[in-house]
Image: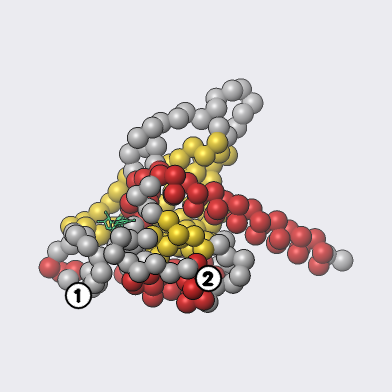
Amino acid sequence: MDYRPYDQTPGTVPTAIKILVAGGFGVGKTTLVGSVSEIRPLRTEETLTEASVGIDDLGGVEAKTTTTVVMDFGRITLTDTLLLYLFGTPGQDRFWFVWDELSTGAIGAIVLADTRRLADCFASVDYFEQRSMPFIVAVNCFDKAQRYRTDEIRAALELDPDIPVLLCDARHRECVKTVLVSLVEHAMRTVGRRRTAVATTRP
Ligand SMILES: Nc1nc2c(ncn2[C@@H]2O[C@H](COP(=O)(O)OP(=O)(O)O)[C@@H](O)[C@H]2O)c(=O)[nH]1
Ligand SMILES: [Mg+2]
């Protein structure tokens, strides 16, 4: 894990950006945050117990014995003056209420998807669409999962044409960085478009 302190030159104020990582259970949120975080990611996991059998659907998820209860938290220095803080949100219906708290101040979200269980990310997509929160879809390409083209995934999720869809491997730092940059760029474009729309509708 490499740690790069941000630029502490007097007058240089680092910008901190908050990003959410959402998606279904076992899709790779904790893995993604852990791949890029310079600080040891804070994880709150609980061992899957008898009680969660039947509640936590394990179909298609290999060797998964823990589940995120509250959130993952990580940080990455993208440039000398740009820090990203990542919050992995719970991917299960019973933790939905946490999302509203976590969304405050976030510039956007990465919705992680697994093509074997694509429906698991519908709720996350709906959540960010309803709140007009910029988001992108990153497909975590599991080894045994069938590969689909991004346009096929876009069609299956009924996404607007401007929402980026990327294929990634949540275990690889460079791959995850590309996803993060894509989200930041998408969020900036969205904000830019909204500003233009407001400016042109003003009398
Ligand atoms: N083969 C493969 N396994 C992955 C990948 N990402 C995550 N995993 C594994 O899938 C399981 C679930 O990942 P996790 O990050 O805990 O999912 P979360 O519930 O969304 O936080 C873990 O055992 C990971 O090691 C990936 O890109 N490829
Ligand atoms: Mg997790």
Q: Gap between marks 2 and 1, in whole Å?
A: 33 Å
Vertical order, 155 against 66 (above or below): below
Q: Image quadrant for the N terminus? A: top left
Mark 2 or 1, nearer chain start: 1
x, y percentage for residue 107? Answer: 56, 54
Q: Name the residue under label 1.
A: 54
Q: Which quarter is ligand 1 in?
A: bottom left
- How far across and down, in percent of the image, does residue 6 sit? 51, 30
The residue tagged 2 is: 151
Direction from residue 194 to residue 123 in the image, left or right: left
Question: Which residue corresponds to the image point at 55% horizontal and 32% vertical from the top-left?
Answer: 80
Residue 49 vs residue 77, the one in the foreground:
77
Q: Residue 39 carries which label?
A: none
Q: Which amino acid does label 2 sit on?
A: Asp
**Residue lying at 82% horizontally and 64% vertically, measured from the top left:** 200
- The amino acid sitting under disc 1 is Gly
